[in-house]
Image (cartoon, helix red, strand yellow):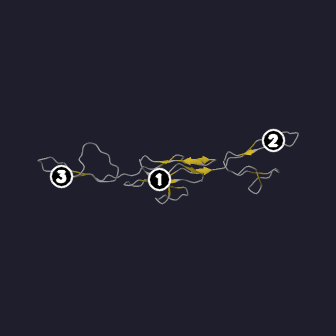
Amino acid sequence: TTGSTQYSGTFSYGNSQVIRVLAVKSGYTNSAIATSAAFTFTVATPTVSADGGSFSNDTTVTLASNTTGATFYYTTNGDTPTTGSTLYTVPFSHGTSGTIKVLGVKTGYTNSSVKTSGAFTFTVATPTLGTDGGSFSNSTTTTILSSTTGCSIYYTLDGTTPDNTKTLYPGSA
């Protein structure tokens, strides 16, 4: 109708919709209404910044999409995400082996395809000894370190294989 928005040049739109247009001129009969085919917008498949790999510490994960204003929901337990899953608000620390699944959502758009990250594998880094053998004339001390933050380190002094029932190294988690 003549009460609708008047066309004045290229315009932008971003919701799934049908465009209908009418041309008018004073003294002329109005044109027939032209109707477009439906425009459907779909959220671009999200990306995962750390898309799987092997790690010895938690890693920071960032989610993104080429669709401006998209919202993301994700899971880290293998479940398919829904709008009831964890809402992504800021990059997060991830330290669980498996995959991350992400759904992109935006009002007026069709939801994205679910992005499944590559597999994440977290393994505690092998400990290192500050002193690795040698000949000494007196007793000596050593340190044991691991680059994995917060890990517990167990040791033996009799050549047996350490496990979590052996001596806990002081200062480890």
Q: Earlier in the sequence, mark 2 or mark 3?
A: 3
| Residue behind mark 1 | 72
Q: Residue furthest right?
A: 137
At numbered mark 3, what does the secondary structure look like: helix, strand or loop? loop
CA–CA distance between discs 2 and 3?
92 Å
Asked if disc 2 and disc 1 are in contact, CB closer than 8 Å, the reply is no
Q: Amino acid at mark 2?
A: Gly
Residue 64 point in image, percent of width and height: 47, 47
Q: Residues within 10 Å of mark 3 (few under 14, many from 20)?
A: few
| Callout 2 secondary element | loop
Q: Local crowd at mark 1 within 10 Å, few (<14), some, or many (≥20)?
A: many
Mark 3 or mark 1, which has the lower sequence index?
Answer: 3
- Circle on res. 133: 2
Point out residue 55 in the picture as x, y percentages from the top left corner: 61, 47
Helix, strand or loop at disc 1?
A: strand
- The residue mark sitting in front, 3 or 1, is 1
Q: CA distance from mark 2 to mark 1?
A: 53 Å
Question: Looking at numbered disc 3 in the image, what kind of residue is underneath it?
Answer: Ala
Q: What residue do we see at 76% from left, 41% from top?
A: 130
* Location of mark 3 (residue): 32
Q: Nearer the viewer, mark 2 or mark 1?
A: 1
Whether label 2 touches label 3, CB < 8 Å? no
Which amino acid lies under the numbered mark 1 shown in the image of this protein?
A: Phe
Percent from the top left, x then y, of residue 32?
18, 52
The spot of residue 80 in percent (x, y) is: 49, 58
140 left or right, relative to 88: right
